[in-house]
Image (tube, rainbow, N blue to C red):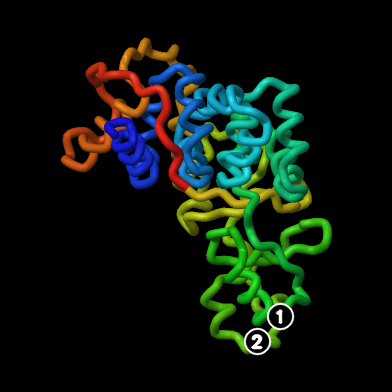
Amino acid sequence: MESIRESALSLAFMRDHPGNAARVLESLPPVQAASLFERAPARISASVMAAMLPRQASNCLASLKDARALELLAAMPLQATVSLLRNLPDARRRTMIAGLPTASALASTILLGYSEDALGAWADPEVLMLTAASRAGDAVERMRHAESTQPSVYVTDDSRHLTGVVDLTTLLRAPEATTLGNLMRKPQALLMAHAPLAGSAADPGWELASVLPVVEPGERLVGVLTHDALARALRRPLDVPDDAAVTASLPGLLVKGYWQTLTGMVDSGVGLLPSVRPVDGAPDER
């Protein structure tokens, strides 16, 4: 009965505090952390893995079978997927890309073509791109069902060359039959995909907007970059410490982190946690 309770609390902690759970799992040997990712619901596992340091998350992913690894990658934001793919061995990376949906595979291949220290590697490609001939009403409908969280439509030609931007507020106020070509404005600023991360925080474009398009030469749209995403990229650790020697059980660590988080005892869910009785298998909640 105790193992069932610990399993339920572990899943609750992962669901409600994915960032804190990620810090706990980063301290464990990859095989041990991967055992939880194998059993927990894909949506919960994907959110926690996406919050982990990329290299350590990739080590966990490498311990999973292909079908489960692809299930988790498909449930993550594309930028997180690319970060994990970047840290996989070449052969496994090719296998994972081949198993992704076509659009995700293409976008991942494009982003992986950039150096990790280039802006293009950190661009979010999940933006809504439509042609100038598209109607406002159709654009609004597409935005309702799009995976992108960006509140703008990027107007491009068939080769993804950026010609303008239309904000959601403009779309909602426009007659449904109005074309995007009549509503679009020029982007306030552009970031070059091959530009280095270092120094990019000082780009004057950030004084105009918190989200900027990232383009290749010829203004071919790669995606967008938020100021927050740039800050995270600049803060990322260049060297990942070796896995800590952990003697506590995985469910016990997560349960301890759960209660510490709820009571405000820690900010990150990580600490010197006491050993608890190992639990061989926590039941899956689906």
Taking the spot 18% from the left edge, 40% from the top edge, the residue there is: 264
The residue wearing badge 2 is 176
Left or right position of 103 against 22: right
Q: Amino acid at mark 1?
A: Arg
User: Marks 2 and 1: in contact by CB < 8 Å?
Assistant: yes
Q: Nearer the viewer, residue 131 or 247?
A: 247
Q: Secondary structure at mark 2?
A: loop
Residue 25, horizontal then vertical, whole percent: 41, 27
Dot 2 alpha-carbon crowd within 10 angstroms: few under 14, some 14 to 19, many 20 or more: some
Q: Amino acid at mark 2?
A: Glu
Of the numbered discs 1 and 2, the one sitting upstream in the chain is 1
Q: Is residue 154 shown to the viewer in this render? A: yes
Q: Nearer the viewer, residue 15 or 209?
A: 15
Quadrant holding the N terminus: top left
Q: Compared with residue 128, is residue 112 higher up or lower down, i.e. above or below?
A: above
Taking the spot 65% from the left edge, 50% from the top edge, the residue there is: 125
Tell me the quarter of the picture where residue 248 sits: top left
Q: Secondary structure at mark 1?
A: loop
Taking the spot 57% from the left edge, 26% from the top edge, the residue there is: 58
The residue wearing badge 1 is 135
Taking the spot 61% from the left edge, 71% from the top edge, the residue there is: 166
